[in-house]
Amino acid sequence: MTTIRQMGRILLTMSVILIIMAIFISSEAKAASIPEYIKVGLRFGDNAASTYTLSSENGFVLGSITDEGFKETLPLPAYDTLIAIIEGNHIALRDKENVLISQDIGKNSCLLPLDYKENGLITFEGNKFRGGIILNTQSNNRIKAINYITMDEYLYGVLHKEMSQSYPMEALKAQAVAARSFAVESIGRHYNDGFDVCTTTDCQVYGGYEAEYPRTNQAVDETSGLIIWANGQPAPVFYFKNSGGHTQSIEDVWLSSNLPHLVGKKDPYSPDYSWIATITFNSFEQQLIQAGYDVGSIESVQVGGRNSAGAVSKLIIKGSKDTLILEKERIRTVLGPSLVRSRHFNIGEVYMGKNSIVFEIQLMLSNGSKTKNADQNINIISGDGKIKSIASESAYITNGKETVKAKTVESESKIDDSIVATGSEVTFSGMGYGHGVGMAQDGAIEMARQGYNFIEILKFYFTNIEVR
Ligand SMILES: [Zn+2]
């Protein structure tokens, strides 16, 4: 039996624990902030070269990157073009007439435009960048090139690649905050490569200065310093194109457990996005082999289960050697995420879409000897010879006594898991585009059109979050 005194002691202990936790969380929160700079790998690994051309209208300055930021070591005001080239085990600098300027620029050296404090630009291999270019040797005797840039300058080069600059400002601002959060979470993602993020969809697509637009830069500026917080911590965030009507919980996509701010919800804002795709069993077998599965010749494909959000959670592939069950997002990874655009799909040509009521008019026309199905439109000839065309769904039929509307059949979007694809190919009919976790970009655009601001948009797609 727990006495009242014992209860009091337990409550007291619990409140002490809560206070300690609150102190812990607030000090954690203060410790975490947005890094001022980010290192973006432009050329590395097999994509690196042994020589690069850099140019800058007003000359260069060579420096090194320290914990405190950029430190100037050698101004080079007389050069508008520099060649970085591997010579021996070092990186040498030459001018455009091939005259040697430095035989070894050293490790972690960074070239900036001389006017970098006035937002000067540097051209690297024909593309303009803000910030500087760090050059390092790498194991295959080539030069690794990294764009050293402030976080918001990096986001300038990301935003339009993620959401077109033509979309409403509040949607662009929501995307800017989400992209900044993603970047903060991505710091050190390529630690082993010597930088933070790469320029492809592996991280976020980054196009440098060439990808900037006034409206996307404005969205970055107006949200500067803001990221998404969940449970007192900077939150990992995800986004994708279109939810197909319901977003996904992260545990239903990649993880075995959930994150409370990444739970699936009904999404009335993502507009209708239906798709249909067919893959032959031969191609499917090749995709499976590339992914490390050998089921032999595919005999059938069918849906084996759905999650609570209505997305396919299991795809059963029966082959001559083995039966394989692909689960969660692995289905799209193996089949190709641009072929199977989402996991809201049916096998076969069973229409799946949003708000999709199709009227099929079953109106028969007869001249007494022959009977024919009426087309979508019916031409009526009136007594004075005028011809009028009406849509067949607005046609009425009368026998002189009673009048009824022409029969219509509603064919709504439906889930049908009874279909088994056999033969030589499988067709997927689906809705939505992307993994479904976090913010639907199409939905964010629609919310902005309906007058929601960027914080309301983010708070709809991410549960129990703060934007600060
Ligand atoms: Zn990457």
Image (cartoon, helix red, strand yellow):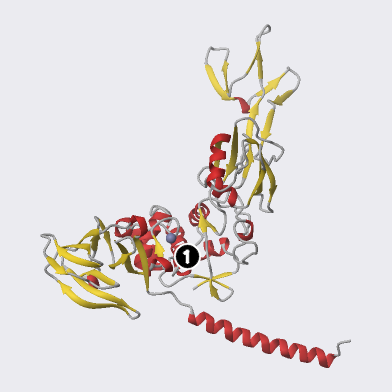
In the displayed structure, does residue 304 sit left or right of residue 254?
right
Disc 1 residue: CB within 8 Å of ligand 1: no
Q: In this view, does 356 lie above or below 366?
A: below
Residue 133 x %, y %: 28, 66
Q: In this view, does 117 lie above or below 307?
A: below
Q: Quadrant of the N terminus?
A: bottom right
Which residue is found at the position 44% from the left and 69% from the top?
Answer: 188
* Residue type pointed to by label 1: Phe
In the displayed image of the protein, which residue is found farthest to the top?
Answer: 369
- Front residue of 222/404: it is 222
In the displayed image of the protein, which residue is found farthest to the right?
Answer: 1
Which residue is found at the position 59% from the left and 39% from the top?
Answer: 428
Q: Is residue 52 above or below residue 300?
A: below
Q: Name the residue under label 1.
A: 182
Residue 445 x %, y %: 48, 54
Residue 4 x %, y %: 84, 90
In the displayed image of the protein, which residue is found farthest to the front?
Answer: 88
Residue 144 visible to the viewer = yes
Residue 345 x %, y %: 62, 43
Secondary structure of residue under mark 1: helix
Residue 340 visible to the viewer = no
In the displayed structure, does residue 141 sit left or right of residue 303?
left
- Front residue of 166/163: it is 163
Q: Residues within 10 Å of mark 1 (few under 14, many from 20)?
A: many
Q: Quadrant of residue 12?
A: bottom right
In the displayed structure, does residue 369 sit left or right of residue 460?
right
- Front residue of 247/52: it is 52
Which residue is found at the position 59% from the left and 36% from the top?
Answer: 427
Q: In this view, does 313 lie above or below 118?
A: above
- Count the numbered circles shown: 1
| Image-quarter location of ligand 1 | bottom left
Q: In which quarter of the image is residue 354?
A: top right
